[in-house]
Image: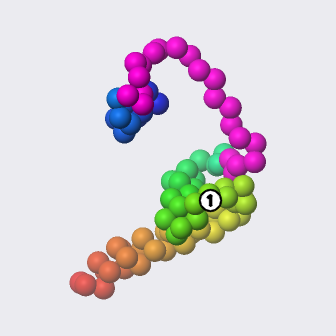
């Protein structure tokens, strides 16, 4: 997947020829690791929010499972208020 993404978004001279050779990836220890099912979307959105609010280096190491539970609930309520509740009140 990585070679495809690099070829799609980078200029050809920066990517070079695609080689199908294995590579090793290691996870950084200090970052929050999402191990619960269903939380990857809210965690990704929170990371994007951290970037969008002007934080050039978002600190994911400060996140905890409890914080993820809280902002997941906030996202659900925002969606409910913006979509479901609005539709219900129109009728």
Q: In the orientation shown, which residue stands out farthest toward the left?
A: 91
Q: Position of residue 45 (x, y in %)?
A: 51, 59
Q: Is residue 54 above or below residue 57?
A: below
Q: Going 68% across and 32% down the picture, which residue do you hit?
A: 26
Residue 65 forms part of the magenta stretch: no
Q: Quadrant of residue 61?
A: bottom right
Name the residue at 73% across, 60% down: 62
Left or right: residue 83 versus residue 41 is: left
- Mark 1, Cα crowd under 10 Å, few <14 / some 14-19 / many 20+, is some
| Quadrant in the picture for the C terminus | bottom left
Query: Residue at left 52%, top 14%?
Result: 21
Tell me the quarter of the picture where residue 60 sits.
bottom right
Residue 79 visible? The answer is yes
Residue 87 placed where, x, y %?
Answer: 29, 78
Query: What secondary structure is found at the residue carrying circle 1?
Result: loop
As rendered, which of 50 and 66 lies closer to the eye?
Answer: 50
What secondary structure characterizes most of the magenta part? loop
Q: Which residues are magenta?
A: 13-33
Please tell me which residue lies in front, 61 or 39. Answer: 61
Q: Is residue 49 visible?
A: no
Q: Percent position (x, y) of residue 50?
A: 56, 64
Residue 15 lies left or right of residue 49; in this view the side is: left
Say how the picture is coloured: rainbow
Q: Which residue is mark 1?
A: 58
Residue 14: x %, y % from top left = 42, 31
Return the residue found at the far right.
Answer: 29
> From the image, which quarter does the N terminus lie in?
top left
- The residue lying at 64 percent from left, 63 percent from top is 69
**Is 25 colored magenta in this rendering?**
yes
Q: 79 or 8, which lies in front?
A: 8
Q: Is residue 32 left or right of residue 79?
A: right
């Amino acid at each position: 997947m990585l070679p495809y993404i690099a070829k799609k978004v980078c200029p050809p001279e920066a990517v070079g020829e695609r080689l199908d050779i294995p590579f090793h990836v290691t996870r950084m220890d200090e970052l929050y690791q999402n191990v619960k099912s269903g939380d990857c979307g809210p965690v990704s959105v929170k990371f994007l929010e951290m970037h969008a609010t002007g934080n050039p280096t978002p600190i994911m190491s400060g996140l905890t499972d409890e914080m993820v539970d809280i902002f997941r609930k906030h996202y659900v309520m925002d969606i409910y208020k913006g979509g479901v509740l609005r539709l219900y009140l129109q009728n």
